[in-house]
Image (cartoon, grey):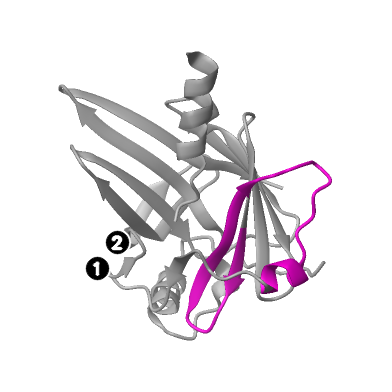
Amino acid sequence: MWKWLFLISLSVLLLVSCSTEKPVTFPDNKDNSEEESIVELVEQTDTDMSQFFLSDKTIAYFKGDGIEFSTYTSRTEWLDDRHVNVFENNGGVELVTSYRLEDDNIVVLQEVPLETEAYTITIEELDKKQPIRDYLNFPLEVGTVIDVWTVVSITDELETPLQNFSNVIVLEQQFEEEAFSRSYFAVGFGEIKREYIAKENGNVFEVTSVIESIE
């Protein structure tokens, strides 16, 4: 899905080295009936797909580990009830990803470095763009393939500095030579963690970014 932020970050590291309010309900992940409803939400076709993004103007802080640029901030900008921009800044590059909510999926319209701080992306501009890939397809079921990602769980549990989550959706992308990426989603928040893990010559290389706080 995901955001080529890690790939861009790694590229930057190598180069350096050598509005509409969208109210969101934040689930507390404690009540069993609520957990069951979240599972039903991701399995049904009429999912409120806005629940996979934070509300308008919300800033999320992600704690990184593994490389310098794995720590980043994410700012959500709703243009209307179908178009949303997410701005990610890891200190090396600011990346903007634009999404559109369609009938039964969320698609990525663009994923580009931000040109200037004053650069704006409008609905009119996005309406002219064709999707470059799928982000999430519904219903979400284990085994479903979304672009290069496979849904491997919709009931994971995950501890983060922000809170503990239940019924976490996990997407995985496999690479060659024992390497893979995972992206973790929670209803009411969207992406809450991403990781890249690779094994080489008996050593494990791991890069993670996990949600730490929101404002």
Q: Where does the image place residue 16, in percent across and percent down from the top left?
A: 55, 18
Q: Residue at x 40, y 70 (%)?
A: 32
Are there few (<14), some (14-19), or many (20+) residues within 10 Å of tag 2? Answer: some
For label 1, the residue is 143
173 and 212: which is toward the camera:
173
Left or right side of 170 for 119:
right
Find out whether residue 212 is within the magenta segment: no
Q: Which residues are magenta?
A: 98-127
Judge by depth and name the residue closer to the eye, 147 or 195.
Answer: 147
Say if residue 188 shows up in the picture: no
Callout 1 secondary element: loop
Residue 80 as seen in the image, left or right of residue 187: right
Q: Residue at x 36, y 63 (%)?
A: 147
**Is 164 positioned to the left or the right of 62 in the image?**
left
Q: CA distance from mark 2 to mark 1?
A: 6 Å
Q: Earlier in the sequence, mark 2 or mark 1?
A: 1
